[in-house]
Amino acid sequence: MREPARGLIARYRRNIDSIVARCHRVKARQMVRSGPSRSELLFLAAFLGVVVLLVGLAFDRVAVERSRTVPGVVDGFFGFISEMGKSQWELFPAGILVLILLAGCWNIVPPMVRVFWAQFGAFAFFLFASIGGAGIFVNIVKQFIGRGRPMTFELFGPFTLEPFRFVYDFQSFPSGHSATGGALIAFGFLVLRRWRLGLLLFGLAIAASRVVVGAHYPSDILAGLLVGYTFSIWLAYRFARYGWAFSLDPAGIIRARVAGLRRGFSRPGRATIVLAGLADALIGRPVWLPELKPIGAAASAESKFDRNRANDE
């Protein structure tokens, strides 16, 4: 058992070292782009804080009263949405996928396969880090604020604060589910652009469900959405500085690095090679790829044709 374990640890170290070295090379080549100034960020934070406060004053009390009168069918539906909004549904698959990919022996597979799974893994890690990071931040802030949840409304009203109570009843602001929703919305706009409307609606539904089931106030979910979204954008910018999953165009706009993913999905033959390459990388030796040499030759010819056509255009 010791030898396989040592080999697996060696793969992890080699792959992590390769990722870190590439990130540093990319960062060294990039021009330094200035982001928003500290004063601009403080102004934006203050403005959003005022918006959240106004939403709380206008809607929090009313929302509690309305949530207690919704029909059982509606409450059950939003209860299901609320359950789907737990971060575990994204964190576990993304984290496991990253661990699996880091265990691969990628020097034995073609460059197309290596690039495809490198980009796929980078986006999986970004999703894991954005949702996990926003969740950690929200759960720390909750303890400092200690806002009572709607279940304490009858006793204390909507604006009671009990910092450092460390109990569920006083962990309302901001909403953790909504932070997950905000991160998913950002992921849709940054990466899955074709699905951005669906992820936008899903993220908003997650946030709204927390009000309907009586777990949060509207100001809680708005703050959670803002935290999840802004943290994800900030994290994407940090990734882009190192050329990992994202890049920065000359105007400083974040772009997802998806060329390798599109190439892998562009033809059925390429998709077959990509999956076979993953299997071989995890096995540690070429097993399936040699059986697909005819498809590989065709995919290579298609790739050259695509490049030549792009050059002609």
Image (cartoon, rainbow, N blue to C red):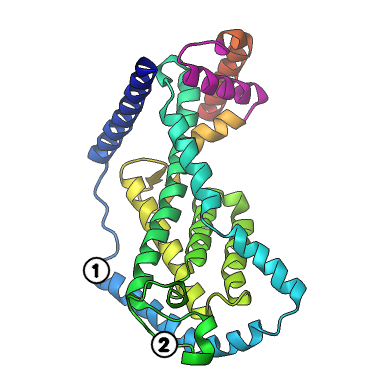
Q: Quadrant of the N terminus?
A: top left
Name the residue rendered at 47%, 76% in the picture: 169
Residue in the picture at 46% in, 75% down: 172
Which residue was labeled with disc 2?
A: 160
Query: For the point 62% across and 30% down, which residue is it?
Result: 266
Is 277 included in the stretch rendered in magenta?
yes
Residue at 55% over, 87% down: 59
In this picture, which residue range is highlighted in magenta? 266-289
Identify the element where label 1 is drawn.
helix
The residue tagged with tag 2: helix, strand or loop? Answer: loop
Relative to 296, say whether 18 is above or below. below
Residue type at numbered disc 1: Arg
Q: Is residue 283 magenta?
A: yes
Q: Which mark is residue 114?
A: none
Q: Is residue 221 visible?
A: yes
**Count of marks placed on residues:** 2
